[in-house]
Amino acid sequence: MTALDIFVLLLMGSGAIFGFLRGLVQEILSLCVWLLIIVAVRFLHPAATDFLSGPIGNEGGASVLAFAAILIVVYALGRSIARAIGQKSRKSLLGPVDRVLGFGFGMIKGLLVATLFYLLVTLVYDSFYGPEENRPEWLTESRTYPLLNASGSAMVDLVEQQRSGQEADE
């Protein structure tokens, strides 16, 4: 077992524990909050920047402040709503099911974070040493290498398909 295996297990384990504690409903709603932040910034940022340009007196400063204000307000409101709904869900009759599904969802989130880390490490390594160079032993000899390599390849293939306009294989 290499350090990479331990790192992946820690990421997946902590994701699973937090998912169990929060439950699937709160996990899903928290992801929806981040999507809502993206939409809010996309549509509200120009108006908020124009509104703040006068008092701030600097276009760049107003833009940064508008971004931060939108992010903080939407995040705080969305997070409190997600927490309230999640608590009601965990206290309901389906609370144990919510927690078990949250455990699995959290583990998948941990795997996605580990895969993104793996892709970043391989990108940096391949940039310095070239793709034809053998990767380090601590990476290739780890037990999680096949899983990370397969999930990383699937992510890269999905992005390439989306960029080219093809539909993803089902």
Image: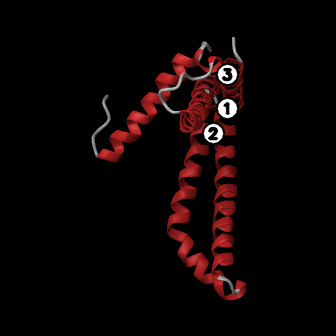
Q: Earlier in the sequence, mark 2 or mark 1?
A: 2
How far from the left and from the top, in percent, is residue 117? 61, 34
How far from the left and from the top, in percent, is residue 56? 71, 84
Where is mark 3, residue-wise? 4
Q: Which tag is nearer the camera, tag 3 or tag 2?
A: 3
Whole-number angstrom distance, CA of label 2 to CA of label 1? 9 Å
Above/below status of 146 relative to 51 = above
Do the residues under discs 3 and 2 have CB atoms within 8 angstroms?
no
Whole-number angstrom distance, CA of label 3 to CA of label 2? 29 Å
Q: Earlier in the sequence, mark 3 or mark 2?
A: 3
Does residue 113 appear left or right of residue 159 in this picture? right
- Label 1: element kind: helix
Identify the mark at residue 90; answer none if there is no mark. Answer: 1
Q: Which residue type does callout 2 highlight?
A: Gln
Q: Nearer the viewer, residue 53 or 160?
A: 160
Where is mark 2, residue-wise? 26
Q: Residues within 10 Å of mark 2 (few under 14, many from 20)?
A: many
